[in-house]
Amino acid sequence: MGRGKIVIRRIDNSTSRQVTFSKRRSGLLKKAKELAILCDAEVGVVIFSSTSKLHEYSSTSMKSVIERYHKAKEEHQITSPVSDVRFWQREAAMLKQQLQSLQESHRRMMGEELSGLAVKDLQGMESQLEMSLRSIRMKKGNLIHHENVELYEKVNQIRKENAELHKKVYEIREAGAANRNTFLTNALTIRENPHTTIHLQLSQPDQHEATEASLQSTNLGLQLH
């Protein structure tokens, strides 16, 4: 007759339970070793008896097997759709909490809902406000300094342009005065000696199509009687 089917349940007799544990533990470790050798698998088995005694087997090292197990577990949780949903739910809850905290802090900075704060909290808010004011003053000072520098450069440019314009006006006035003096001198010479020969040199304006002969000055001798 064949061996009857064994009912899988806890063995009540402690002696029988211990004997069964010893036999099956040895068989399990043997199968784990065969699996590692035959299939080139990394195998690790950890067993704790009812008396908390540790029995283990690993094809490489138990530390390596455990580290690989944790890494694979984390990767599985990250790629799992359920874990993704839970992750984003935690992120959403955390962001919501941060938003509420910021809104509450903003209301307190505006002087609202201060009745429930302790003296220490009020002092902390006062310090934050002072730091913010110092930062604002510093930024405002830098901005004003930058604007002053730009204004100073514009004023210097205007002064330079005015100086150049004044110089040109002065040169034009000097040239006009010299022309008037020359004209008066010639007029006096003609008046004193009416028979003086006056030589006038006329220059024609530059033109692209003018010939070289037309660019030469024409000397005219005029005899006044």
Image (tube, grey):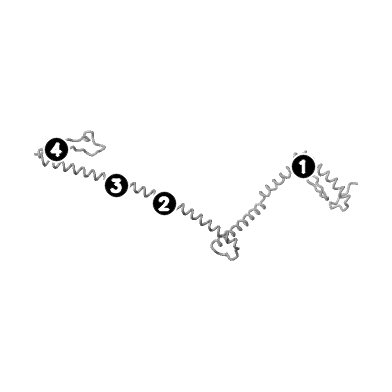
Q: Quadrant of residue 97?
A: bottom right
User: Which of 62 and 176 lies nearest the eye of the viewer?
Assistant: 176
3D distance between C-alphas at marks 2 and 4? 63 Å
Between circles 2 and 4, the one closer to the viewer is 2
Furthest residue in direction left, as rendered: 225
Mark 4 lies on residue: 198
Residue at the spot of label 2: 148
Element type at mark 2: helix
Lower sequence index among marks 1 and 3: 1
Say which amino acid is labelled 2.
Asn
Q: Residues within 10 Å of mark 3 (few under 14, many from 20)?
A: few
The Cα–Cα distance between marks 1 and 2, rounded to whole angstroms, is 77 Å
Going by the numbered disc 4, the residue's amino acid type is: Ile
**Residue named by callout 1:** 58
Task: Please name which of the two marks, 1 or 2, marks the residue nearer to the observer.
Answer: 2
In front: label 4 or label 3: 3
Mark 2 is surrounded, within 10 Å at the Cα level, by few (under 14), some (14 to 19) or many (20 or more) other residues, namely few
Amino acid type of the residue tagged 3 in the rendering: His
Q: Earlier in the sequence, mark 1 or mark 2?
A: 1
Classify mark 1: helix, strand or loop: strand
x 59%, y 62%: residue:
119
Mark pair 1, 4: CA separation: 128 Å
Q: Secondary structure at mark 4?
A: strand
Secondary structure at numbered mark 3? helix
* Picture mark count: 4
Mark 1 neighbour density, 10 Å: few (under 14) some (14–19) many (20 or more): some
- Residue type at numbered disc 1: Ser
Q: Which residue is mark 3?
A: 166
The residue positioned farthest toward the bottom in the image shown: 115
Foreground: disc 1 or disc 4 = 4
Image quarter in which the C terminus is found = top left
In the image, residue 102 lies at what x, y percent? 57, 58
